[in-house]
Amino acid sequence: MDRTSIIAIIICLIVLVLWIPLVNRIFPPKPIPAGMTNATNSTLTATNLPPTTPPALATRTNVSVPQPIVATNIPESTRTLTNENARYTFSSHGGGLKLVELTHYPEIVATRRQKHSPATNRFATLNSFSPAPTMALLDGVAVQGDGVFELSDISNGVRAVKTLTNGLTITKDFQLTTNYLIAVTVRLENHAAEALQLPAQEWIVGTSTPLGPRDNGQMVGVLWYNGGKSEEVTAGWFANPTLGCSCLPGGTPRAEYRGGASNVVWVAAHNQFFTLIAMPQQAGQELVVRKIELPRPTGEDAQMVATNAAVPVGYEAAVVYPNLTLAPNQVFERQVMVFAGPKEYRTLARIANTFNNNVDLAMGFDRALFGRFTAFFARLMLLSMNGLHDLFKVGYGWVIIILTVLIKALFWPLTQASTRSMKRMQAMQPQMNALREKYKDDPLKANRKMMEFMKEHKISPLGGCLPMLLQMPVFIGLYVMIQSAIELRGARFLWVSDLTQPDTLFVIPGFLGNIPFFGIPGVGLPFNLLPLVMGVTMLWQSHLTPASPSMDPMQQKIMRYMPLMFMVFLYNFSAGLTLYWTVQNLLTILQTKLIRNTPTPPPTAPMPAKGPVLTPMRKKRK
């Protein structure tokens, strides 16, 4: 690699880091309409429920919207149920589940910088700001009427009843069960003297929304299963960027997603750690997902986001069922199981086994890089981590360290053989250089002779890369697992308050505040200690690892200082991931030092060619 190539690589990296600030300066974001800045933040507190009309009926722009869920000015009435897992609020407007408050999980995990934040005193919620409650039936006066239901209590649940002028009575029973499940039964009864023609209905699943004011919404979306594989609808699908790259101009934004062909087995409206899943007994005909605008944070919450941040958005999902004809006095019934809780793999796996519907795919592991291959390692890492936690009864930070030691021990023989192979390669460098010089006019013959030489002396040119390549699936699986593992959310370790977030100790105001990988827009540069320690250990490791003799000196220098670029890209990664990588580096350094102090066996000399054995001739006696 010549000097020009090195300069080009450095310039590309600088442009990559500065791309977003440059684009924002050249194409500044559009000013926010005045009416959008005074939206009320209706997130519920931990101690009471506001009796106000839900902001769920907020404005949706540039989307195809069904008729309003409520067509009258009748005040909303609610029913609230609480069990050991959550608090459920049911609304008469639409006759469905309006809000789920997960009482064991805060909206934001308190850190040193946020311990006085209002969001740390609120529960994590599902279906907040939804235009319609879960299990509301939309599309037409024939199934909606004025949208107002009568609520009443039943055994461990709530009943919503609505009788329309056409003789149709809609009865919905919601009963709380275990494992964050709600059993829903919807009955359609025709009390008219003639048959009723009901149009296709949208059965609302819920709305996925960001988790707190600091959630950037990158992991908010709708996931659904068609019986063979899962599919996901996120911000990228609605943005519809040119060639799939958000940095390229052009592309017409989409307003509505429709998918499925009578194979919608389940639908999950999710964010990073929590999900609301509808599992109908009969697969839906189609899935509809719409993008909705959410109220902007106000008060103290507004101080946690940049002043020029985009309007937060959510995604409303609904299952479509075909038109239906009800004969006089006919009763039609449909059952749906609703899960509203954390993305806890063991719980979802139990539900998947019970209903045989693969709902554990709602974890989203198979949607990451390499699909099912990555999902296998992500599940393996999660189950191993939980198993070690149950076995040793220690915090998850120490569990990650134990898991790293076990993984390193598993790969120890391979790494040891690789390091010895590289040492032998260094010892044979003079002979290899002599071969290159001898056959410098014939590159093909030189390569053949070099391979024969390496084979004779048991030298592998890929020996140094093989251990890293074999450990990459483990690392990728761990990265994917940490993204949504609820077990690590709020898990503390030393100065780290949340292993799923960067270990920010303090923020330098205004410094690098608009540069990706480093700064928080409008806030400043966070000081994350673990990535710095990781970078130092990677740099130390690179200086201890023998360089490949085939590299020229300039390439060797680049490889030695490449860890600094890893530190840049991983600076804002989760503390759990950087903790794993740091411990991995320290163990590799220890192993390298041990192998260095162990004498390397001399290379095996080639065996002499076989042939007749010649004996010296005896002298003739005189």
Image (cartoon, rainbow, N blue to C red):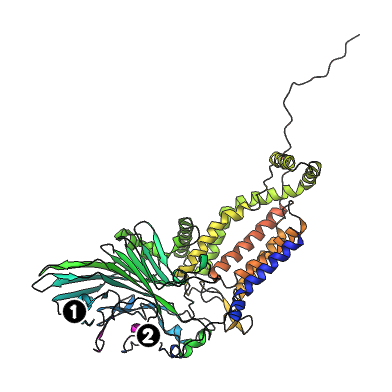
In the foreground, 291 or 45? 291
SS of the residue under disc 2: loop
Residue 407 in the image: state x and y as whole percent. Answer: 55, 57
Residue 500 in the image: state x and y as whole percent. Answer: 50, 72
The amino acid type of the residue labelled 2 equals Leu
SS of the residue under disc 1: strand
Q: Is residue 75 magenta?
A: yes
Task: Tell me the quarter of the picture where residue 329 sits.
Answer: bottom left
- Identified at 24% across, 82% down, the residue is 92
In the foreground, 206 or 342? 206
Q: Is residue 198 magenta?
A: no
Task: Tell me the quarter of the picture where residue 287 sits.
Answer: bottom left
In this orientation, does residue 536 appear?
no
Please say if 213 is above or below 176.
below
User: Which residue position is annotated with label 2?
Assistant: 44
Give the left or right position of residue 40, taking residue 166 as reference.
right
Please say if 605 is above or below 618.
below
* The N terminus, quarter of image: bottom right
Please say if 25 is above or below 190.
below
User: Which residue position is annotated with label 1?
Assistant: 162
Residue 518 in the image: state x and y as whole percent. Answer: 61, 76
The amino acid type of the residue labelled 1 equals Lys
- Identified at 34% across, 82% down, the residue is 56
Which of discs 2 and 1 lies nearer the camera? The answer is 1
What residue range appears in magenta? 52-78
Determine the CA span between mark 2 and mark 1. Answer: 28 Å
Residue 334 in the image: state x and y as whole percent. Answer: 22, 67
Q: Main secondary structure of the magenta part?
A: loop
Q: Residues within 10 Å of mark 1 (few under 14, many from 20)?
A: many
- Which mark sits nearer the N-terminus, 2 or 1? 2
